[in-house]
Amino acid sequence: MILVVGATGNLGGAVTRALLTQGKSVRILARTKSNYQPLVDAGTQAVFGDLKVRASLDPLCQGIETIITTANSALRGGDDNPETVDWQGNRNLIDAAKAAQVKQFIFISASSADPRSPVPFLAAKGKTEEYLQASRIPYTIIAPNAFMEVWPAMVVGLPALQGKPVYVAGTGTHKHSFISVADVISFILCSIGNPSAINKRLVIGGPEPLSFRDAATVYERVLGHPVTVNSVPLGQPVPGLAEGMQPLVASFEAFDSPMEMKELTQTFGVQLTPLEQAVRRMIAKQ
């Protein structure tokens, strides 16, 4: 049986449904306030628990061969934050997995995760990676670059679809290999029980490095009208973005993150999605 933690989130939910489509037996961690019932109706087994409460995780992990955790504190608030959920919560889950002798622990991290990062989310991911690697549980760390459906979609797509100007932090010219959520899911599914994925950190990105200005050009092509792009000096808030996202969007201007994906795509049989295809897919769903 496979346990998915974070199943009520966008990525975890998509992974869960993909596993069910493959005929896999799936258990999910359910929180009392989470929208878990549709996944139960789809065929999962729900066990109530809380990553912050270590004792609640032992029954969750019993009889599990593989754990996939996409859990994070984004959009939660209250006592749920990068320290309590992304770090301490995942550490509790690793301890429970070790006690239950789980055969593979798949942790969804981030390509720029670093325990010394000034960004709490990335620091928590980095500390969790180190703890998992030291646990002696057979692990797979999947560390994707930024998602196409999140950053280019929010920074560029949302205003462009509304006919408004796009605002980018700094010049908006640093290039990153944004990856589609669908491709991340493919790598997760292909890693389950795969010897090529055991005790590996898989850093994954999209088919080509693109800047936010490049993304604006893609949206222009898809929408069929010009997209105006304005620069916002670093340190000033980018209009239209939530306060919590401001440091992250500014961080894209501090570096480039191109990724060579030929070897990994061949090893795992994943065909990467270009940004234009992802944009057309997102628009078609609206």
Image (tube, grey):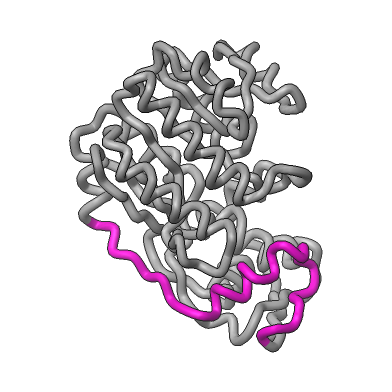
- Position of 217 compared to 142: left or right? right
Horizontal and vertical percent position of residue 25 = 44, 13
The answer to whether residue 274 of the structure is visible from this angle is no
- Position of 255 compared to 268: left or right? right
Magenta stretch encompasses residue 240: yes
Q: Nearer the viewer, residue 1 or 139?
A: 139
The quarter in which the C terminus is drawn is top right
Q: Quadrant of residue 259?
A: bottom left
Horizontal and vertical percent position of residue 242 = 77, 63
Prevailing secondary structure class for the magenta stretch in the rendered image: loop
Residue at 42% in and 59% down? 111
Magenta residues, start to end: 234-262
Q: Nearer the viewer, residue 119 or 110?
A: 119
Residue at 69% in and 75% down? 227
The quarter in which the N terminus is drawn is top left
Residue at 32% in and 38% down? 135
Is 212 situated above or below 98? Answer: below
Q: Nearer the viewer, residue 148 or 26?
A: 26
- Position of 155 compared to 66: left or right? right
Magenta stretch encompasses residue 194: no
Residue at 41% in and 71% down? 257
Q: Quadrant of residue 172?
A: bottom right
